[in-house]
């Protein structure tokens, strides 16, 4: 009997322990521990994890500040949506028509659809550092908006500088925006606008009442926000150069010329140049065409329809120093990274996080070939969208091929002129004239804007 009682006691003890464990009141977690958890979430996690943590219970929510209280000026990089991109619906409906944006996290494959307040009154002109840059359709005022917390920072209207720096409707509708750290204050942000066709670069800081013209007639090929500053590539004296667009230095000797960070003497002008951030480093990627050298022996190997296979890539790490200049170091391997390149923006993602991608590779596009992949391991290129082409450059040959791949979405995100219209880049990188209904829809959408050049000139005179 005694042995039975001991046995029974040994069985009930663990059960009692488990009951005590499950009865713990997590809402009574000490405040310092709650804040320690949130700090670690913001350091290694994401703003969405922080928001989800605060939503668990009222006690945790009360002991942690809201994103607006933590960073009302959108200056803290820990509270920004890191590694998020915007997806395209592919139904030719712009996000500002639906009032919502679907976001995708490239490290966890998390997918979230968020409603953006007042998006129907704005047009997206940038998705920079995880933040949306919007222009008001009626007043041309700029707004930077956090897509998850809806914290917004407003900037002045572009009307006073329209007649000089923008001038054309296409320039206004296709300008590209970037969010940088403000040059005059460590507690605010700045927006830098690159205006196509006119080749102007404009900037304004939060709280400013006007836009500064930083550079005139500067043809910028590619831009990158790195460590809070905006860099770009341009041709000067028949050489490619990396220049610092913002912040800029002003002096009577330099006028509004950009600061040259690095020159690429080994990269001739016929190359195509891209800037991309990968693993916290700035990379310069040069794409060149390898010309086919005809001989009697290799003439049969020439394939004029597969000229894109002769593209070659060279890469350099841009090592910045405190003096404002940089040293270029050759890079031969990307390890698990896959680069997505375009003139409007570039991405670096991990093939480990997204297994459908190929590591140590570059995804790019050329005329009439929207989805190409170059393997740095083999040195070979291949076309990935052969069976997804909806037209032959003239007429429709098949319906849209669904579902879209992650490669399609990543390349489309790198081409904002398409995804802001709700068009997948691999389908509509070239819109044939036979697509009359779609072209008329796009044209009508452009002229829906209440903001007009004549109104801009009038508003500029009133302001000046």
Image (cartoon, rainbow, N blue to C red):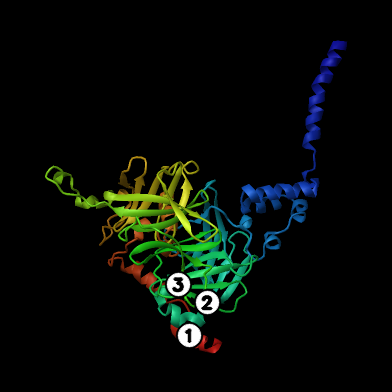
Going by the image, does 36 lie left or right of 48?
Answer: right
| Front in this rendered view, residue 346 or 328 | 328
Q: Is residue 244 visible?
A: yes
Residue at 73% over, 48% down: 36
In this view, 213 is above or below 80: below
Going by the image, does 204 lie left or right of 332?
Answer: right
The CA span between labels 2 and 3 is: 14 Å
The CA span between labels 1 and 3 is: 31 Å
Q: Nearer the viewer, mark 1 or mark 2?
A: 2
Q: Which residue is mark 1?
A: 455
In this view, 212 is above or below 383: below
Q: Which residue is mark 2?
A: 212
| Front in this rendered view, residue 376 or 416 | 376
Q: Earlier in the sequence, mark 1 or mark 2?
A: 2
The local secondary structure at tag 3 comes to loop
The local secondary structure at tag 1 comes to helix
Q: Earlier in the sequence, mark 1 or mark 3?
A: 3
């Amino acid at each position: 009997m005694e042995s039975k009682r001991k046995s029974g006691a040994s069985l009930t003890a663990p059960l009692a322990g488990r009951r005590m464990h499950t009865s713990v009141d997590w809402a009574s977690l000490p405040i310092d521990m709650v804040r320690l958890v949130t700090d670690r979430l913001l350091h290694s996690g994401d703003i969405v994890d922080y928001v989800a943590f605060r939503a668990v219970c009222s006690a945790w929510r009360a002991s942690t500040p809201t994103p607006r209280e933590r960073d009302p000026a959108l200056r803290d990089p820990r509270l920004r949506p890191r590694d998020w991109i915007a997806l395209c619906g592919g139904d030719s409906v712009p996000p500002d028509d639906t009032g919502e944006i679907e976001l995708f996290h490239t490290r966890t494959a998390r997918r979230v659809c968020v409603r953006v307040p007042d998006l129907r009154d704005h047009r997206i002109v940038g998705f920079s550092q995880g933040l949306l840059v919007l222009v008001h359709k009626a007043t041309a005022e700029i707004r930077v908006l956090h897509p998850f917390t809806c914290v917004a920072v407003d900037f002045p209207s572009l009307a006073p500088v329209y007649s000089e720096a923008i001038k054309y409707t296409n320039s206004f509708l296709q300008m590209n925006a970037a969010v940088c750290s403000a040059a005059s204050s460590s507690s605010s942000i700045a927006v830098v606008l690159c205006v196509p066709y006119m080749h102007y670069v404009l900037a304004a800081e939060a709280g400013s009442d006007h836009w500064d013209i930083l550079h005139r007639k500067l043809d910028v090929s590619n831009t990158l926000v790195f460590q809070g500053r905006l860099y770009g590539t341009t041709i000067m004296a028949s050489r490619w150069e990396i220049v610092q667009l913002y912040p800029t230095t002003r002096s009577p000797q330099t006028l509004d010329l950009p600061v040259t960070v690095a020159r690429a003497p080994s990269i001739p002008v016929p190359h195509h140049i891209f800037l991309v951030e990968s693993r916290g480093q700035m990379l310069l990627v040069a794409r060149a065409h390898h010309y086919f050298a005809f001989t009697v022996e290799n003439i049969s190997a020439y394939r004029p329809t597969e000229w894109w296979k002769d593209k070659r890539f060279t890469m350099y790490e841009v090592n910045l120093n405190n003096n404002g200049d940089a040293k270029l170091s050759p890079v031969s391997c990307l390890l698990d990274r896959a680069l997505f390149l375009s003139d409007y923006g570039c991405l670096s993602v991990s093939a480990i996080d997204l297994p459908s991608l190929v590591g140590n590779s570059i995804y790019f596009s050329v005329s009439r070939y929207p989805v190409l992949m170059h393997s740095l391991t083999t040195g070979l290129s291949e076309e990935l969208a052969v069976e997804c082409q909806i037209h032959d450059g003239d007429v429709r040959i098949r319906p849209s091929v669904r579902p879209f791949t992650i490669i399609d979405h990543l390349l489309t995100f790198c081409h904002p002129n398409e995804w802001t219209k709700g068009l997948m880049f691999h389908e509509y990188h070239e819109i044939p004239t036979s697509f009359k209904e779609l072209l008329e829809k796009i044209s009508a959408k452009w002229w829906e804007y209440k903001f007009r050049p004549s109104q801009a000139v009038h508003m500029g005179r009133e302001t000046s």
